[in-house]
Image (cartoon, rainbow, N blue to C red):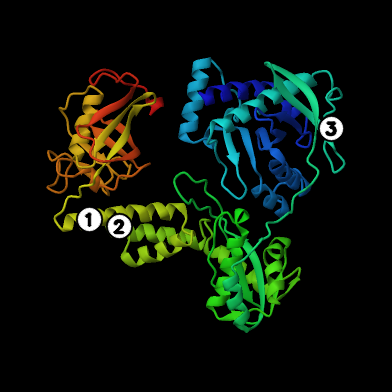
Amino acid sequence: MMFDRLYDLAFQYKKTRLWEKIGGAHIFAVKLSDDRIGYISVMMAHEGVHGLCLYIGDEGFWTFWNLWKAGGARFYDQFYLEELMELKCLQCTFESKEGLSAEEHERAKAFVRSHGIKLGGKYAYPRFGKKEPYCVPWDLQTEDEADCLCLCLSAAAWIADSLEGSGGAKLNLDEINGETKTIPMVEVKDGVHVLSQTELPQNEPPRWPEPKRYNEITAANLKKAKRQGIWQCEIVRFGEPVQGGPEDIPAFPVIVLSVEAESGWVLPTEPMMYYEKNPEELLNRMLEAFVRQGLCPEKLEVRDERTFALVNVCAEKLGILVTMKNTLPELEDARMDLLTKMDKGPEGKLAQFIRMVNMLADMNGGRLPEEIMRQMEALEAFGLLPVELVEMLDETRALTSEYNARKAGMKAIVNKSYVISVSLARGCYRHIRISGTRMLWDLHRAIIEAFGFDDDHAHAFFLDNVKWSDRESYYTERVGDGGWTTENTRLGSVGLHKGKAFKYVFDFGDEWVFQCKVLREEPGDSGEPQVIRSKGEAPSQYGEWDDEEDW
């Protein structure tokens, strides 16, 4: 398993305390298994947190180099923070327990217990992740990423051992600067670490994405439009990440903010994700916004090279003058107003809106009012709806669909089946395949039989994943209030989808809590419920089960 190897090497690296021997500019390289070069930088201990970063290939190296040029270890400098968002690397950091997700904490605890390791210090837990430009730091996603990070940790531990008594002289491990041409490189040959030198990338790529083309039809319509006004423009990045889909890494969307200098009027423009990969699309959205207003700028004013690179070539073809200015007051006012509206702080307008939406949902039986839903769906279409509100919107859509079906006297029947993971504790779970035409009661019976329990107590499902919640709860008719129960509610009518998590509670006295999650959806009716995977011995229903730490 990839995490066992990662944890093993991470603890080996931690013992070397390499961060006390070299600085963040003493980078060295490792040759990866596919002959790519990885560049390794030690993360200096900041507020107790330390670790390693692995920048792969020329693309990764230049994100490191731009960060270092912007200020090195000078945290919170404006330019430093901008470069920090652009990093592309794999990371191993050592965090406190609070810095880990529940899954990461349990995984680390399991490794420590099985290997007899005693953790010391506040920042004792290894955490493995990746950083993509302008995205939220995320988990490793492939075996290849794990293998690369393993080679990084192994090379770093070997470098630390080689530094003993040499002070770095034998390794020629010096701080890099603009004159540095080569750095030490570690390669593993036949299980042995071998030291050599490798050249640093020298041909720095263009700093900012520049569109190679644009929509010629849109440009032609813009040429025919009325020339009007001086427009101040800037690429603005929102501070709240948006997740395109369950498998996507949350990223920070951008918009070209365009303001008429004389009136302060803001051009309505659609935002987008991942503009660095498709600058043409961002430019086209800006041009289309001007066409919709039936006007063409006489002049564009920008104050940064990034925006200049986006608009200049097209502007020249259209005969629009582009100038650089250090200060653009009208643009700054519009920018601050835009970001304040999306501020997620406790007093920000977005936080106030979330509190208001929660209150309205509570007053409406857990559902959002229709008008609020329409407004939120408009923001969602532009990719501007925060994760918390997307989840709330999804819940309301599922509830509304279910409510409408029931109101019409229908019980939804879907021609699909589900594979559901049901866990009782860490290392004890069953995967159950069950048809969407089955009732919740059939899932209850399948769970009870899978874990070897007697069906002699009441039970309930909590589809909002909150135990004893009143919002999406289904009880057996023995304790129900005459409404929808597990006996008369089909699985296909409760909004199940891949990734959906919910709880099943059995025996309200002993309160056995089973955590459920939909692993996948499959076409067709799968027939009788069946257990397709089983791990861990189920506890005795009437015996002792006192392992609260594993809950």
* Residue 117 horizontal/vertical position (percent): 56, 17
Task: Indicate whether 97 appears above or below 535.
Answer: below
Mark 1 neighbour class, 10 Å CA radius: few under 14, some 14 to 19, many 20 or more: some
Residue 95 at least partly seen: no
First of labels 2, 3 by sequence position: 3
- Front-most of residues 118 and 31: 31
Q: Say what amino acid the circle numbered 2 marks.
A: Arg
Residue 268's label in the rendered image is none
Tag 2, which secondary structure?
Answer: loop
**Residue to which mark 2 is pinned:** 367
**Residue to which mark 1 is pinned:** 403
Task: Indicate whether 283 appears above or below 300.
Answer: above
Dot 1 and dot 2 residues touching (CB under 8 Å): yes
Tag 1, which secondary structure?
Answer: helix
- Front-most of residues 12 and 520: 520
**Residue to which mark 3 is pinned:** 174
Q: Say what amino acid the circle numbered 1 marks.
A: Tyr
The alpha-carbon separation of the residues under discs 1 and 2 comes to 10 Å
* Residue 56 horizontal/vertical position (percent): 67, 37
First of labels 1, 2 by sequence position: 2
* Residue 177 horizontal/vertical position (percent): 84, 41
